Amino acid sequence: MNSYTNLLKTRGVGRIMAAQLLARFPFGMLSLAFLLHIQRVHDSYGSAGLVLAALSIGQAIAGPLTSRLMGRWGMRPVITSTMIVCAVAISTIALVPMSIPLTMVVAFAAGLTMPPIQPAVRTIYPKMVNSKQLTPLFSLDASAQEIIWVVGPVITTFTATQVGTVEGILLAVAFLIGGGAWFISSPELGRVRIPRSRRRLGAVLTKPPVLLATIVGFLLVATCAAVEAGVVATFNHDGAESGVVLAVFAVGSLVGGLALGHLQIGPWALAQRMLIVVVGIGISALSLNVWWLGVFLFIAGIGIAPALAVMFSIVSASVRFSDTAEAYGWVGTGQLIGAAVGSALAGFMIDSSGPQGAFVVASLLALLGFVVPVLGRRWHPDLRGRDASPIADTEPVATVTG
């Protein structure tokens, strides 16, 4: 734990981590808030699913595009402009009665303009700490983001059921604007400038570690989405057990990130962490008892944040600094598509064979998430004793010292 304490004592680290978590809080709120609101207004879960699909598609497309624009226009202008448009679009869905097709268009616009906070902060991190601290910092960040998925749905559900669904959506907008403004005002955004990439859009995917992280991230998040669908189907969406089990799943990830984040990253690191996920989810699929699921999903969760931290580290160490934001954008897009695919596959299996089918899907996806880094281990950088910082660009990188 000393490594994390020292990290948080490093100038600006605690502040910018807290700011980006607050700005990203809507990611843990909007899906559920839109689901409850659209279902209440249109009395249809199917219609709500269409709106959520439009939102996810917009986010998936935006990932590499807005990230790349930060190298051309700067982080603050891109984040500020996208935040304003996104906030207006989300507020419109909450306040203006619209048909489902029109709501889908506005939701797509909201997804397309979701501020690229995550690529920005992970591009900034290597400039804030020394090389030995970078991997633990990625791990701490991956662990801390579990707060979004534990607390966000709880706040949304309470607000939507006790106050109103409109207020639930507007609360997410408040987090978006408040956290975004705090993040934009951070001095680090002025000290670090992302050089303009001279490569074509998508060329960064030709880097094997980036492609590996994108594919495994897709499979890992698809696994988690299938588990979430299975848990909700097992205990019904209004059952307290589902919230408790999913919270335990996320807490396992938080614990794993803090416990394993200091370990050095060798060529087997990603496969080893995914193996924990495979074992936990595979055993959890054997029974739908609440205690059984709680224990083994906690074990599965122990591998999630460490696996994400490895992905962030191998991407950082494999690309030029000017390409880091776009690379993280592609990784994020893979994860968003994984969430949609995992939910859809689990939904089909639940309809055909019951909730246990979702856990079978999750187990198979997790197994693929383990096999891919095993087969692709030669693409996996060996970072033991190495600097995980991005490769320096050939042109000078402008920094402003405070």
Image (cartoon, rainbow, N blue to C red):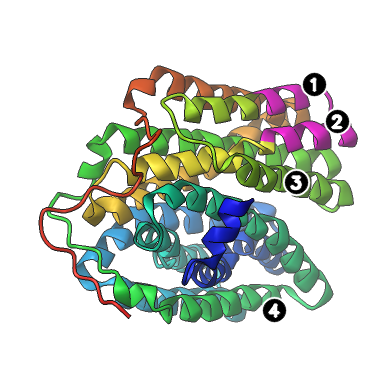
278 and 394: which one is in front? 394
Q: Which residues are magenta?
A: 279-300
Q: CA distance from mark 1 to mark 2?
A: 9 Å
At x 47% / y 39%, what residue is drawn?
Answer: 310
For disc 3, the marked residue is 246
For disc 2, the marked residue is 292
310 and 336: which one is in front? 310
Q: Is residue 23 magenta?
A: no
Q: CA distance from mark 3 to mark 4?
A: 24 Å
- The spot of residue 294 in percent (x, y) is 82, 37
Secondary structure, mark 3, is: helix
Mark 1 touching mark 2, by CB under 8 A? yes
Q: CA distance from mark 4 to mark 2?
A: 36 Å
Instruction: Please state which of the two labelled residues, at mark 4 or mark 2, is closer to the viewer.
Output: 2
**Closer to the N terminus: mark 1 or mark 2?**
1
Amino acid type at image mark 4 = Glu
For disc 4, the marked residue is 167
